[in-house]
């Protein structure tokens, strides 16, 4: 992969911070945007802007075609059977809240159990906790082993209680662990559970095949796959979506409204109340085109080599003083590396790195239950993407050496 060429497509890399060119290692929080994506959104608003699905005039038809074209593009990315399985939402958080609310109103009853994992982002924990509060479901957490992999024995133990829903991230935003979703889904289905997958951290790095994964519902965010903020996707199996009630009511999602009754439209419209983020959807489609243009195999190979380079640097320069969490084997994980540096608080690390132009994130990463499980208050996280190269990793570790000197 020609990183220099990729990087040239991202206007943000012309910027400097504190006298240093930007070294952006926070792509797990949000990715940067290539010019093609920015232009796609601008082109929609400049040339095709009208509200969708409502007008008979030519401009509105264009806007509707652009929106539905974006839905088809996402369906292709997910290997979905039908574009109607793709619901546009604001992001993973909204998708998972939609799922919890809708299943709470239809498939779940007091005393039913939902099984999540200790490595989930808050957005795949809190919506279920809210159902626990409001309707008295039980919520259980699959534990991890010492290397940050989900424990199969613990999964099996929880499945004996026959949860109605098993929900799991494809890739952990802290540990980088790639979960064996297909295997989990097969076990969960055998126990009679629905399988919900949080693909927020996997979608940016690998093409998703919802059927191969064995998912019933799956969510991801546009802004992490080079797209804009405020657009994301909930995919659901057609037969399942057809049975799910809407989470939100309003325009566009109804067949008929009368004073005494309302009839909802078929999915996906049923789940898209109000004016959607059409410009965002169009730009998301363009982001998926961009990633496909770079090539998924090339992206995987590039990220694996960066990960291995980073692990070597960490080991050679810091030895035992720097601990990276998550699986040691690069084939079991993605490039996200959350770490602790002996004797230094993660916020101090991130602040000193910022002065060197290196952007990393420090904190609980919206994974407080995982932090508690790991016994740490916070971690520093480096999360590279297609526009990072080994020189960025060098800057990271040069910066960390400065941090170590300051705190020596
Ligand atoms: C694993 C995971 N799930 C969910 C989310 C939430 O995504 P969003 O904020 O785009 O809704 C994130 C974001 O960091 C994440 O990493």
Image (cartoon, helix red, strand yellow):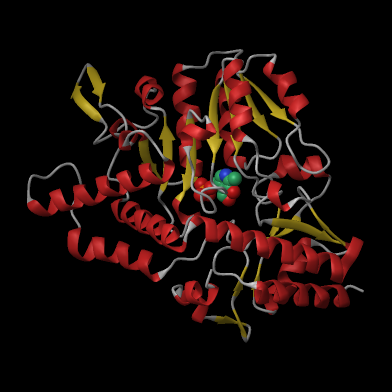
Task: Kindly indicate the quadrant of the structure image that contains residue 121.
Answer: top right
Residue 136 visible (yes or no): no
Residue that lies at the very extreme toward the left in this rendered image = 57
Query: What's the residue at 18%, 59% (across, down)?
Result: 48
Residue that lies at the very extreme toward the bottom in this rendered image = 19
User: Where does residue 209 sit, x and y in percent of width and height?
Assistant: 48, 39
Query: Is 367 placed left or right of 242 in the picture?
Result: right
Q: Quadrant of the C terminus?
A: bottom right
Query: What's the residue at 74%, 28% (across, down)?
Result: 152
Task: Kindly indicate the quadrant of the structure image that contains residue 363.
Answer: bottom right
Relative to 292, residue 267 above or below: above
Relative to 3, residue 265 above or below: above
Query: What's the residue at 71%, 36% (across, down)?
Result: 118
User: Where does residue 243 sit, x and y in percent of width and height?
Assistant: 37, 19
Q: Nearer the viewer, residue 20 or 148?
A: 148
Task: Kindly indicate the quadrant of the structure image that contains residue 350.
Answer: bottom right
Query: What's the residue at 37%, 64% (across, down)?
Result: 37
């Amino acid at each position: 992969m020609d990183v220099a060429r990729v990087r040239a497509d991202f206007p943000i890399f012309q910027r400097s911070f504190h006298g240093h060119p930007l070294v952006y290692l926070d792509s797990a929080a949000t990715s940067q945007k290539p010019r093609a994506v920015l232009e796609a959104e601008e082109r929609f608003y400049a040339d095709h802007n009208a509200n969708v699905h409502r007008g008979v005039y030519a401009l509105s038809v264009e806007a509707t075609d652009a929106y539905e074209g974006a839905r088809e593009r996402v369906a292709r990315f997910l290997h979905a059977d039908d574009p109607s399985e793709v619901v546009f939402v604001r992001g993973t958080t909204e998708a998972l809240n939609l799922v919890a609310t809708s299943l709470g109103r239809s498939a779940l009853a007091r005393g039913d159990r939902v099984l999540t994992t200790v490595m989930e982002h808050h957005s795949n924990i809190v919506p279920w906790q809210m159902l626990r509060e409001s309707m008295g479901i039980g919520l259980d957490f699959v534990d991890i082993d010492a290397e940050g992999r989900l424990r199969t024995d613990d999964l099996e133990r929880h499945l004996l209680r026959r949860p109605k829903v098993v929900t799991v991230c494809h890739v952990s935003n802290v540990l980088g662990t790639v979960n064996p979703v297909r295997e989990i889904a097969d076990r969960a289905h055998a126990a009679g559970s629905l399988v919900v997958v949080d693909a927020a951290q996997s979608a940016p790095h690998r093409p998703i095949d919802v059927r191969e994964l064995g998912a019933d519902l799956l969510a991801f965010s546009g802004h992490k796959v080079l797209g804009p903020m405020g657009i994301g996707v909930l995919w659901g199996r057609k037969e399942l979506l057809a049975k799910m009630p809407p989470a939100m009511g309003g325009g566009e999602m109804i067949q008929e409204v009368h004073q005494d009754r309302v009839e909802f439209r078929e999915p996906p419209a049923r789940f898209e109340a109000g004016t959607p983020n059409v410009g965002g959807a169009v730009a998301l489609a363009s982001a998926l085109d961009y990633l496909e243009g770079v090539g998924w195999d090339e992206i995987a190979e590039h990220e694996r080599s960066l990960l291995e380079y980073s692990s070597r640097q960490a080991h050679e320069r810091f030895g035992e003083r720097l601990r990276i969490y998550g699986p040691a084997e690069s084939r079991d994980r993605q490039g996200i590396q959350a770490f602790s540096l002996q004797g230094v608080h993660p916020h101090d690390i991130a602040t000193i790195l910022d002065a060197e132009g290196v952007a990393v994130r420090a904190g609980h990463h919206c994974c407080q239950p995982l932090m508690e499980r790991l016994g740490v208050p916070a971690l520093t996280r480096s999360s590279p993407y297609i526009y990072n190269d080994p020189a960025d990793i060098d800057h990271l570790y040069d910066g960390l050496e400065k941090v170590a000197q300051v705190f020596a």
